[in-house]
Image: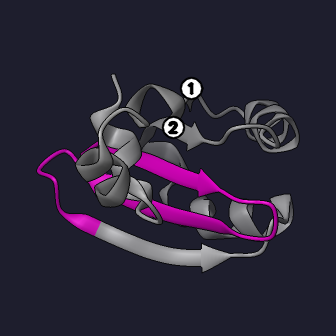
């Protein structure tokens, strides 16, 4: 079963969520902004991960480059288009699973 990953990247932490094809949340974890820590969290699921969506406004490059260097398919999810809607913004704040809504 394929797994989707959402990472809500902040300046000092990364909120990570893994979800299977049925929408079941497998992991919801806050990690430091450290590629090794994020890769360690992903490693048990690596063969099943279809895509990693990274939601970030400015500091994403190191994470996207590092994940791609390790063979992951990564897409950027820009939170800015949702700023017009207070309810959507409030829903997505701090929730890495909101990255799955951006397609």
Q: Which image quadrant is residue 43 in? A: bottom right
Residue 69 is left or right of residue 13, and the answer is right
In primary-sequence order, the first of circles 2 and 1 is 2
Going 82% across and 43% down the picture, which residue do you hit?
59
Mark 2: which secondary structure? strand
Mark number, residue 1: none
Going 55% across and 53% down the picture, which residue do you hit?
7
Q: Which image quadrant is residue 102 in? A: top left
Going 16% across and 53% down the picture, which residue do you hit?
23
Picture coordinates of residue 75 (x, y %)?
56, 26
Camera-nearest residue between 28 and 11: 11
Q: Mark 1 points at which residue?
A: 75
Q: What residue occupies the far left of the structure in this picture?
A: 22
Residue 28 is left or right of residue 74, and the answer is left
Mark 1: which secondary structure? strand
Name the quadrant of the C terminus: top left
Picture coordinates of residue 69 (x, y %)?
83, 32
User: Is 40 located above or below residue 22 in the figure?
Assistant: below
Region in magenta = 1-25
Can residue 16 be found in the magenta stretch?
yes
* Secondary structure mostly seen in the magenta stretch: strand
Can residue 19 be found in the magenta stretch?
yes
Q: Name the residue under label 2.
A: 53
Residue 58 is left or right of residue 79, and the answer is right
Query: Label 2 to label 1, Cα distance in Å?
Result: 5 Å
Picture coordinates of residue 96 (x, y %)?
44, 57
User: Is 4 located above or below residue 34 in the figure?
Assistant: above
Going 60% across and 29% down the picture, which residue do you hit?
74
Picture coordinates of residue 90 (x, y %)?
34, 59
Mark 2–mark 1 CB contact (< 8 Å): yes
């Amino acid at each position: 079963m394929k797994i989707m990953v959402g990472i809500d990247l902040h300046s000092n932490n990364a909120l990570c969520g893994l979800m299977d094809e049925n929408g079941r949340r497998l992991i919801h974890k806050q990690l430091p902004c450290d590629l090794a820590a994020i890769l360690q969290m992903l490693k048990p699921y690596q063969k099943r991960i279809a895509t990693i969506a990274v939601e970030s406004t400015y500091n994403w490059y190191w994470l996207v480059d590092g994940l791609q260097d390790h063979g992951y398919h990564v897409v950027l999810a820009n939170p800015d288009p949702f700023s017009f809607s207070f309810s959507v913004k409030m829903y997505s704040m701090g929730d890495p699973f909101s990255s799955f809504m951006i397609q």
